[in-house]
Amino acid sequence: MQDAHGNSIKVRSKLEADFAEMLNTFEAEYWYEISKVSYVIPASNHTYNVDFTTKNGIYWELKGWLENHAERTKYVLIKKQHPELDIRFVFANPQKLCGGTKMTHAKWAEKFGFPYCSIKDVDTIRAWCKEKPSKRK
């Protein structure tokens, strides 16, 4: 698979491959897993490898399943420690339950203030790709 720059990329899932193809179709300028965000889990340092980063500054996280509490906590910690970042989720199915809870992916994203949509919501993804860069601080 190739990105918009003609560089070969190896994505980690079919969902990410479908999304890369969608971005290519929209002629959106993007990079795959080039952005790294440091965050701290109390008493330990970690880095988060962003799935996709578009030129307008959006960090895209593609999720088939938010598997467990530790994974969900990671995103909440990143948001709290880096409020200037525009992190958005594209879910395979926003109505799927998060692992170990009765909360859907959509409800979780809403609860913690993450913009989200379904991979099937092509109009929202296209609109997000066309947004001007954010001036979040």
Image (tube, helix red, strand yellow):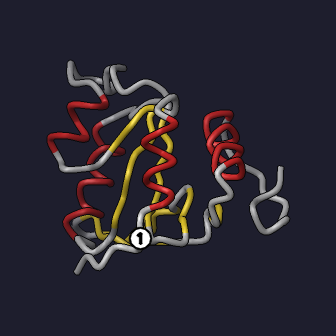
Corner quadrant of residue 80: bottom left
Q: Residue at x 43, y 24 (%)?
A: 93
Front in this rendered view, residue 58 or 35: 58
Measured from the top left, where is residue 17 in percent x and y?
70, 41
Q: Residue at x 31, y 54 (%)?
A: 75
Measured from the top left, where is residue 22 in percent x and y?
65, 43
20 sits to left or right of 119: right
Q: Residue at x 28, y 38 (%)?
A: 69
Corner quadrant of residue 97: top left
Secondary structure type for disc 1: loop
88 sits to left or right of 101: right
Corner quadrant of residue 111: top left
Q: Residues within 10 Å of mark 1 (few under 14, many from 20)?
A: few
Measured from the top left, where is residue 4 in percent x and y?
75, 62
Give amino acid for label 1. Answer: Lys
52 sits to left or right of 94: right
Q: Is residue 103 above or below residue 8?
A: above
Measured from the top left, where is residue 81 in percent x and y?
23, 71
Tell how many labels.
1
Q: Is residue 18 above or below residue 135?
A: above
**Which residue is under mark 1?**
132
Q: Residue at x 51, y 33 (%)?
A: 119
Q: Is residue 88 above or below residue 63?
A: below
Front in this rendered view, residue 80 or 124: 124
98 sits to left or right of 126: left
Q: Which image quarter holds the C terminus?
A: bottom left
